[in-house]
Each structure stands twice: as structure tokens, then as C-alpha cells.
Image (tube, coloured by chain):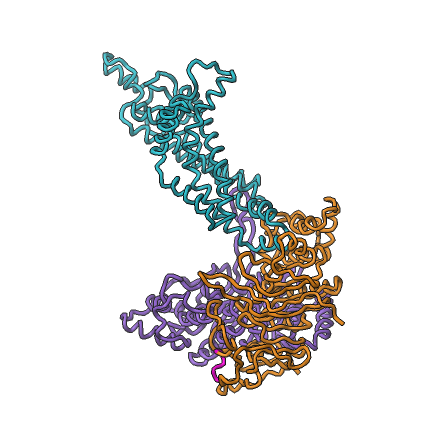
Amino acid sequence: MGFLKVEDLKVHFPIKGGIFGRTVDHVKAVDGVSFSLEKGKTYGLVGESGSGKSTTGRAIIGLNHITGGNVFFEDKEITGVRKAKSDIRKDIQMIFQDPYSSLNPKKRVLDIVAEPLRNFENLSRKEERVRVQELLELVGLSPESILKYPHEFSGGQRQRIGVARAVALKPKLIIADEPVSALDVSVQAQVLNFMNEIQKELDLTYMFISHDLGVIKHMCDQIGIMYKGRFVEEGTATEIFENPQHIYTKRLVAAIPDIDPRKREEMKKFRAEVNTEYEQAYNDYFNEEGLAYSLKPISETHLVALPEKG
Amino acid sequence: MAEKLLEIKNLKTSFRIKDDYFAAVDDVSLTVNKNEVLAIVGESGCGKSALAFSIMGLHTRAKMEGNISFKGENIVGISPSKLNKLRGKNMGMIFQDPLTALNPLMEIGDQIGEALLLHNKELSKTQRKEKVIKLLNKVGIPRPEYVYEQFPHELSGGMRQRVVIATAIANEPELLIADEPTTALDVTIQSQILDLIKDLKEDMDSGIVLITHDLGVVAEMADRVAVMYAGQIVEIADVTTLFEEPLHPYTRSLFNSVPNAKEAQDRLHVIQGIVPSLQNLPRIGCRFAPRMPWIDGEAHEEHPEMHEVKPGHYVRCSCYKHFHFPEESKEEEHHGVS
Amino acid sequence: MWKFSLRRILIMIPQLFVLSVLLFVLAKMMPGDALSGMIDPNVDPERIEELRNQLGFYDPWHVQYASWVGDLLKGDLGTSFRFKMPVTELMGQRIVNSFWLSLATLILTYLIAIPLGITSGRFNDTLRDQLITGYSYVGFATPLFIFALVMLWLFGFHLQWFPTSGSVAPGSVPGTFEYVMSKLYHLLLPALSMALISTYSTIQYLRNEIVDTKQKDFILMARSKGASESRVYNRHIFRNSLLPIAAFFGYEITLLIGGSIFIENIFGYPGMGQLLLESISQRDYSVVVGTTLLFGIASILGALLSDIILSIIDPRIRIK
């Protein structure tokens, strides 16, 4: 069994309506997704806004209410576990998108990073301080900065503080929700390199949620593509980028701007072809509601959402 | 010969902080021709948006020095009424965030119609509506009659950005300034919007200033590229030259730090240090020097100038001749995609 | 919008219920009852007890509450022992006076606050703005009753420009032009006193709203379309900034009620506020309950009005 296994996960949000605000319908933010993460690897979850990728991440860690399905972590069921003191909360941590709003501006770095330690471990003041300084060193910040406040740091440094907080309890899995989307390219490079380094050092598993396909390709071993709450395709980075099978994936990959200005005409033609194919084949790849079918394996690692044969 | 539309010479835009002025745009000179896309690339805080706002005259409390000549006429410091005749008619602007660029209390039709109303008083109400609907059609908005009466919050991000574009091009401006037009959008929508801007350029024969931080967007769209760092242009060249033979240390570093969906990299290049804030800009010498301390100080000019390396390819400071990536990171130099 | 309004009105039902229960409990807690002041002390106490039984004073509380609410709905609020007349009739004359005073105060408040707020917001951090902000802070810091007394002394007694009490000159005939003018003349000074003090919140709210809106992207976009400064202000900034002010309108009524209690007493203006205070000091409980109930209902209606106005002018709520 896998390291983290998600089975038929569903997260539905109620829509309130009518005069009495009763639930009239549901938004199926996540509508039956299954996947598993391998230890020490990086799993990428890609999709456009509204695809349900962030909701999936948040549901695993217990920030969203799970409507249906199961989540197993190291063979233990953790579906909907919310108890603050449980080990699962210690083993799975999250890094958020916006380094500007995810750190409490009124707290010192020491308090921010030590917060999870205080929740789970009984350390003396001095031990705590030493641990925080070690952690800051690990993320490449000077140990003297423990008494500073978040606004004294740049965006990249803040994201490192967020990472220091996330790794404080030596977690096994980190769910990173768009960790570099708010950062400039050169800062983004710092954070990505650094995430790779600590992955090796601490034997971490990442679930990397992003809409940026360049970043996903750079970071991930296995990739899942989401659309309207369902998976349309899953495979290794090479399979997804070199040999996309689902029409949605094809269109998504084709839309990435090419870094070579000489290929402009070629890309334009290619995109036009893919778009025509997308329009023509839309009904073959999506059901009447415009949703993806369930995944069918086409090789050992490559799964595509195709309709039942016949 | 290409026809010059916009020519900026030694532009300096400064903001007052406490008792001192700080230049967000410093010594910028560039030209934009008709039917040409000039991309301005840089990271946040490099002054690219301040430059765009300077061209449009949107800074209300800034000191502007130098020359911006639009169709041969200097527009720095001209009267508001003269400026208002140009804005929206001869030059249009596409804003970055479609969620905030539209007035939440005004119907879509009125917002686009306002651009027409201001510059074409002869149009009757019905003519104006007809034209707005044509514009909505042109930017690919389905059911334009219906959208005409909707409010911004009823549209998706991609649709709102189309409305912003429709407004900017309402009077077929000769110059279009697009400030990160697709940054807030998903990649498939981005490709549609970029195509739309390209088509409009061909249709109207306009010059476009495209402000972006995304090198992929630059490669797809630009004819020429200017790279900005700390308020200055550090390199300017046509797009293929810039991607294949980047010279300035900053340009080269930037290229190496971007993860690329098309080819695999082990490690991304990291530019040392941080982007200096407006108040901490180095005021003398090469502004990028503090971020490449392994390069000998002698390599830099005391007052870095733009040098024409090849026709049309300019680089600031002579340090590019001595630049190499630091030893320990063992990075291959980026030679573009060949 | 209809759905929203209907829902909003339904929410009022529990609010009104809570209000009525509170008032009922308060009324019951007050010493004495309707009979204490009305009956000749020479009447036999046993007979009084009998009367009390007949009138249901010893019924369980919910029965009493039900009959009280029943009377309310019929418009029967009991009898004032001081004036020996039904409370409803007593309040009837006062409501009209209070209504005109409140209306005049509201109009004056907006006449003063909106131009000042707009000037302050448009030219923020200039001398003009600082003067206006200074004025509104003084207004904020000055207690209403002191300011009103000063106004009364200065314009009423010292300069004698305005009458010092009453709502109309004695001897005026209702319906004549003189009568209306006299009414207006009498309420001008109290209304002005209250308006000058209560503009603070509206001025500052409007100022901050304008300063905030000025920096929005859609304002830059309007400028980039070629809109002149005056158009940018009139069509985009003011419109969007006045919206929260309009929504605030209903709550303004609640504030007015508090103010009118002071103002009407100081200026001897026969309105609801004066009636309330007098009745409290004279222990005329049925009148106290009646006026408090009315004030409570007015506040609830004010909040309702605010929400409905907002839903009409803000498309983001209107569509839902």
C-alpha cells in the first residue's frame, strides 16, 4: 500500500438559497478522486482555477470537510481526522501560497516557528530557542533573525519561514499549495531549489499543488491533472508532457508559452490544431455534464479518463 | 523603414518619500514603432509598471523628467485636457488585474461605452451601443447583448479581462500598453488573450508595449525586448537575439532561474541577494554589481552607459564582458533553445 | 432583490419578539401597577384585590404576556396616569413633532456632511482637509447636551434669534401658513444643534471611502480612457463612495433617537424624547413602555431600511 492513499475523495460544498437559506444544491469541488503518493517523491496536482486541486490538498490535511471517500496515511485511515494533538497533524504539514498573509505580522519569527513545537512538544524556553535557530539555519536564514517580525523579510525569506514552521515537527509529508506563485522568478528559483534540498535531507514527500506547468515539471515525479473536481489524466512528468493522451491535457500543455521565439509560427499552428481537436472531440472525452470519465490505465503509470468501451 | 510611434529619452520618474525623491524609473530611453510589440521584462519593483504609468501620465504625485514623445510631440508635463484627448483615443491601457480594473457598480456596456463617449461626442446612444456590442464580439465574448447589461462580478476573470481589452481598444488606439495582461489568468485563457492582442495589433497596425515578468510570454509575443532592473533598462535587443545571445549578467541570470516546461534542469540558478527597494537603490555604479560579488569590481563602469554591441542590441555597463556564473553551482550557461 | 427583502423582513419577526418580551419583563418589574394610582385610597383593599384578579394580574405570565401583546396589536398601550389619557393618543401628537425634528436634523446633517466629506476626501492631506477633519473631531469630542446648551444660550437667549422652547408659537391656527412657518422656526435651532454635532461619522466615513476609492484600479482605468478629473470624481469616485453612506442612512435614525432625548429636553420641544424623560421622572410607566417600544421598533425599521437600500443600490447584492 502507498504512503498516502486517497480513495474516491469527495468534497461537496452546499449552495444556500431560497428565503430560508436552505441547501438547494451542492458544488462538487472534488468529485471522486483517487491517487497515491510514493514516499520520498513529489506528486504534482495541476489544474486551472476552480479545478478542485487546492480543495483536495486542504481536505487531506483536514481543513475542508470530506463528503465521501477515504484517506489513508501509512496504512492508517485519517479521513476527517481533526484532533489537533493527533500524530497525523504532526506528520502532515502544509505550506501556503501567500507568504505575505500566512504569517501573523504581530508575532516574532521565534513564535511563528515555535508554534507547532509548543503544541506538540514540551520544550524548555532554551531548548525551544535552540531548535528554532537550527530550523532557521536549515532554511538558510541567519539564526539571529528569530527576534524579527515578518515584515522585515522579503517574500522569498518569508516563504522560507513558512517552510521552517512546516518542517519543525519533522513531518513526513508536506502539502505545498502554490508555494511559489506569489514570488518573482529569481526568488521562486531560491525556494524551489531549497525545497529540493530539504526533501533529500529530511526524506520528505511533497504534494505540490500548482497551476504553473513549468514549475510542476521541474519539481514533480508523478503528476495528476484535475478538471472540474475530477482527474483527467495521471502519469509521470514525461508521460504528461511528452505524450499527453486526454484532450484536456493536450490543450493545457499546448497552451504553455514556448521559450523559443523562433518556434512561434510552429506553436501557433500546433495550438490551432489542438484547439480544433478539442472542440471536435469534446463529446468523446467528457460526459453529458461536461465532466471527465473515470481513469483507465493505458500503461503501468499512465492513466487517462476515457469513456467505457462499447 | 519602421515608423516611430513612441520615443522615450532619458526618462526619470521620481516619487517623494519623506523629504527626498527616489527614482523608480531612471534614465530610460526606448522607441516603439508601429505594428511592433516591445516587451518590457523584469521582476517586481524593477520599475516596469512605473514606466507604463509614466507613458500614460497616470502618476498623479510623481516628478517626471526627460522626454516622452508620442508621434513627434512631447507629452511630459502637457495639460490634463490635452492628455485626456490622447488617453483612450490614441493610447489605451490594459490593466493587470481584471477583478479590480472594472467599476463594480457600472454595467459592462457603460464602462466600455464611456471610452467611446469621451472621444466621439457625435455618436448617438444607439450607435454607441451597437459599437460596444461589436467590440464585445471582437474580443470573443459570447452573447454580447446580454453581457452588455451585466455587472463585472457576474463575469469570470477571463471574460472581465476581455472587457478591459475591449475598453482599451474601443477607439483603435495607435499605442496599446498592456501591463501584465495575463498574469492573473489561467494558461489556456492566457493563450487566448495573447492571440487576441496579436490579432488586434495586426488589425489596427498599433504599437504595443507589453509589460511582463513571464519569459514565455515574451518569446511568444515580442518583436523587441527591453530588460529592466532597478529602474533602468539593462539590455535591449530583438527577441531572437535576446533569447539566443543574452549579454547582460542580469538577463543571463534571469533566463537560468526560470523552470522550463520544455527542457529539464537539475538546479535553477539563484540570483544572490534581493531586489533592492526603491529607497535602497544603488545610486552610482552598476546597479547589478552587488548581486554578483564574485565579479571583480574593476569590470564595472563608474557611470554605466548603454553600449550598442550590434545594431539594435544595447547593453548597459561593460561588466557583461567579464561575467561568468559562480564556480560552485556548476551551471551550464544558457544558450537559448537551439 | 425581492427575495432578499422578504428574507430580511422575516428576520425582523424574532427581533420584534425579543423586544416585546424585554419590554414586558421590564414593565412587570416596575413597582406598582395600573391600579395603584387610579383608585381612591379609601376603597377597601379587598375590593382592590378582587379587581386585580378580574383584570388578570395573577394569571400565569404567558397569559399576561399574550393579552398584553393582544392589546398592543389593537393599539392599546394602556393609560397614562399623569395625563389620564390613553398612551397612544398621548404619543400621537408627540410623534409628529419628533418626526419633523428628525427629518430636519437628517437633512441638515447631510447638507453639512456630504460637501465637507467630499472636499476632505478629494483634497486629502491639504489644509482644507485638515480644517474639516479638525471640525469633525471637535464635533466628536463635544458632548451633545453641552453644545446644545451653548447654542440655546447663544442663539436663543443672548441673540434671541430663535425661540427657546415649544414646537409652535402659542395661538397659531393649524393649517395656516404662519403655523407651518412657526413650526419650522421652532425646530431649526434644535435640529441644527444636533446636526452640527452628529456630522462627524458621516464626514469621516465619506472622506475615508473617497480616499480609498481614489486608489482603486478602476479609477486608473477611467483616467486611461481619457476621463477628465471632474468626470472621474463625479461618475466613479463619488458614486461608489456614497453607497455606504446611503446604506448608513437607516442606522442614522437609531442615532437620532438617542440624540433627540437630550435635544428635546434642552430645547423644551414636545416630542417623544421629552415625553420619555418626563415619564421616567414622573414614574408614568405605561408611557415609558410605550415610548421605548416605539423607539425600539424605529431602530429595527432603520436597520431594515439600511439593508434594503443597500440591496437596491449595490448590484452585487441586488442580483442574488
Q: Residue C85: say if magenta.
A: no
Q: Residue drawn 67% across and 76% down?
A: B238
Image: C260 above or below B126:
above
Q: How many numbered badges does the structure rendering display?
A: 0
The residues colored magenta run B290-294
Q: Residue drawn 44% across and 66% down?
A: A78
Observer-nearest of A143 and A11: A143
Image chain in cyan: C
Residue C136: x, y in percent? 42, 42
Q: Quadrant of residue C317?
A: top right
Q: Viewed as shown, does residue C26 lie left or right of A244?
A: left
Image: A216 above or below C8:
below
Image chain in orange: B
Residue C292: x, y in percent? 38, 29
Chain A drawing hue: purple
Q: Residue drawn 36% across and 72% down?
A: A145
Can the viewer see residue A175 in this picture? no
